[in-house]
Amino acid sequence: MKSKINLIKFTKILLSFSVLISIGSCQRDISELQEATNPTNGDIFIDGFSSGLLYAAFGGSVPTAFDTDKDVTYNNSAMSMKFAVPDFNDPKGAYAGGAFFTNSARDLSRFNTLSFWIKATQPANIDIIGFGNDLGANKYQASISGLPVNTNWKKVYIPIPDAAKLTAEKGMFFISEGPENNRGYTFWIDDLKFENVGTIGNAQASIFKGLDKVTNSFIGVTNNVDDVAAIFNLPDGVNQTVNVSPSYFTFNTSTPAVATVNNAGLITTVGAGTAKITANLGKSVAKGSLTINSSGAFLSAPKPTQTSANVISIFSDNYSNVPVDYYNGYYAPYQTTQSADFTVSNDHVLNYTNFNFVGIQFSKPTIDASTMTSFHIDIFLPQALKQGANFSVQLIDWGADGVYGGNDDTNATRIFSSPILAGQKWVSLDIPFSSLGSLVNRKHLAQIILSGTNIDNFYADNVFLYK
């Protein structure tokens, strides 16, 4: 929703000019000058558009989906905003959507909510609707998702997460909605404005879905504060979840020498030790946190020695990788493995946590490894090797039909344990195809299944085939 297809200005352009008047030798002390402030106009559409409002249709939307309507209005107003959602596969665009914004910023800090009335030709759920999209940085965007509407007029509130931040806002309103059950329909919005409603409750803010998370890290690793949200109690008693830009929050770190966090929620590990990242939304303490356990400097995997002409790479910064469907298939219901991949100084590393098994798939297209002789992977177990630990690598060929589970699939597994397997250091595992007798075919390799016993967490790098 970044590119502009259609730009409409709803007000006439007023040309202004300034006149410099000099009266004798009079001068004014600069300390007497007042700092300019932005207008505090909260109206967007009240019987028509407020001054200076612009509209831009989002990329991929129907450029003409938005219009005004004098026939269908709320409370007999002069006109309403009308949005025509297209059918599925409409050649003009996939959805109705765009942003209403101003070139000159407004001060919205005295308001606490965006409100409007809405109705539709049928029951539907609006995909996303909100404010703060100015077709620029969208720094203070806020929205609600899946807004239910029907054929009756309904008043909607989208609370401002922290109005003190909105002293210079240009993004007044935005909306995006696709077909419902592949069919289009029409909805209307009226009496659209920012206002101050005294019966909106304080925010119940959260980061990381309200969970207290823990992660291992190294100097140079960055993470983002994600899954940020705020719940407000509306005048009708409903608890409304608002999608919130991280810029509304004030982020805190318990130990700046270990991890820092900027205003956008970017966390950077800068030293060894432990740091806890928390947040506030205005005066509200956000639920959820991230505890970072940093081991200090990261030791990268050994640099491969094979030349690129002799390698088919699946995951490595040292070669060009083939297309990969995924590095974690999240195979329900038996897989417990999660991913917490990280990057250190442009070195991308796979990080598997809560490990039992994980699948890496590359089926579009499959790999012809008939001329390759071996498989390679580097793994690092951050903890000491537990007694009885083992690590298995299974390679799966889908056969000529290129379909999983077909009659011509073949596979083979190699299991590693101590002393080859070790903890707290990089271990390079090389598997000659000559040792995998049951892998009869290698012209349609499509999957790697990694599994283990008594291994909770490991990093992986340099996953490739070579000759």
Image: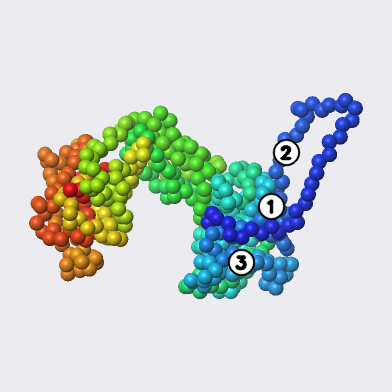
Q: Position of residue 196 (x, y in %)?
A: 66, 51
**Label 2 – label 1 distance at C-alpha:** 18 Å
Name the N-terminal-most of marks 2 and 1: 2
Q: Residue at x 53, y 67 (%)?
A: 93
Q: What residue would you read off at disc 2?
A: 36
Q: Amino acid at mark 3?
A: Thr
**Disc 2 versus disc 3: nearer the observer:** 3
Q: Secondary structure at mark 3?
A: loop
Number of the label disc, if any, that sits on residue 64: 3
Q: Can you tell which quarter of the image residue 11 is in? A: bottom right
Classed neighbour count for the residue bearing mark 3: other residues with Cα under 10 Å, few (<14), some (14–19), many (≥20): some
Whether residue 187 sits left or right of residue 46 in the image: it is left
Name the N-terminal-most of marks 1 and 3: 1
**Label 1 – label 3 distance at C-alpha:** 26 Å
Classed neighbour count for the residue bearing mark 1: other residues with Cα under 10 Å, few (<14), some (14–19), many (≥20): many
Q: Secondary structure at mark 1?
A: loop
Q: Residue at x 53, y 56 (%)?
A: 1
Classed neighbour count for the residue bearing mark 2: other residues with Cα under 10 Å, few (<14), some (14–19), many (≥20): few
341 or 378, nearer to the observer: 378
